[in-house]
Amino acid sequence: MAKKITVPEIRALKTNGRKVAFITCYDYTSATIVEKSDIEMILVGDSLGMTMLGYDGTVGVTVDDIIHHGKAVRRGAPTTFIIGDMPFGSYNESIQQAIHNATRFMTEFGADAIKLEGGVRSAAAVKAIVEAGVPVCGHIGLTPQISSNMGGFKVQGKSMDAANMLLRDAKAIEEAGAFMLMIEGVPATVSKYIRDNINIPVVGIGAGPGCEMQALIMHDMLGFYDWVPKFAKKYANLGPEMLEAFNEYHKDIVEEKFPTTEYSYNTKVEGLE
């Protein structure tokens, strides 16, 4: 794999036409495969609440959860750019809390940057974290941590007023010093409207084809689940393949077809006869 992409190189995506791939990852084994791939960036996302911990959403994820999984991902992907996702409640109480937890991500698992949700409401936290020396990726549009306020996981920005509110959020995050912005779950035209009016690059997840970077949840793209969002292309269908393998293994056990001599240690021990 090529050397790690840098924050200045990510900023330059806004004008140089280069496209970059971004994927969630939560464990060592998966990270080793991403590290070998051409994918440039990893998000240790609070989506691990659903994909790894079995929660209904992301709200129950803690800072310690992200750090625990982030350490494993960093060991598996030492030269991949990794962003740690600030979970619900980790930056909402005070500026001091936001700086403290962002710093923990950098020092305890070696994140290259952090991500947090919210536009205008999170701008002060973004500014303070950036001034503390931590690169920040903003996140607007469908923001899962407050999805209950949105009526669930629904497309955002479906009116001109809503699009302008998103643009206001994007500009607030840019002015606060974020080096990139995630836009999730908005119409492609709205995403373009925002991108055309800010000066930092955008990573889209369900935000149309024009973004400088594109992101997907690893478990969605690999087909671990029957249902995936409209924007999530399945590049593999591993869930059914794993189920078939598990059932074939069980069948071999029941029918005494495994282990055979091939899968046994066959050293002759004198005197056992």
Image (tube, rainbow, N blue to C red):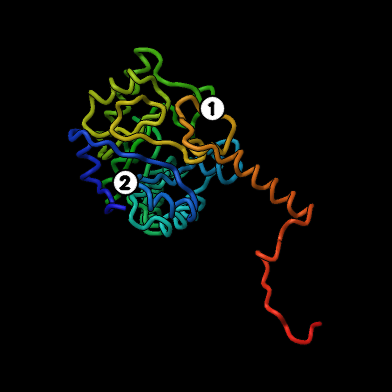
Q: Residue at x 70, y 45 (%)?
A: 247
Residue 71 on image: x %, y %: 45, 57
Q: Decide if residue 121 is on the left or right side of residue 67.
A: left
Q: Is residue 227 above or below residue 259?
A: above
Front position in the image: 268 or 132: 268
- Which of the marked residues, 2 or 1, is nearer the chain's N terminus? 2
Label of residue 6 in the image:
none
Q: Residue at x 33, y 48 (%)?
A: 113
- The C terminus - image quarter: bottom right
Label of residue 129 in the image:
2
Q: Dot 1: within a 10 Å radius of its alpha carbon, few (fewer than 14), some, or many (20 or more) residues? A: few
Q: Residue furthest right?
A: 273
Q: Is residue 231 above or below residue 163?
A: below
Q: CA distance from mark 2 to mark 1?
A: 26 Å
Residue type at numbered disc 2: Ile
Q: Decide if residue 250 is on the left or right side of residue 237.
A: right
Q: Dot 2: within a 10 Å radius of its alpha carbon, few (fewer than 14), some, or many (20 or more) residues? A: many
Residue 169 on image: x %, y %: 32, 27
Helix, strand or loop status at disc 2: helix
Residue type at numbered disc 1: Ser
User: Which residue does the numbered mark 1 point to in the structure image?
Assistant: 148
Q: Residue at x 23, y 24 (%)?
A: 197
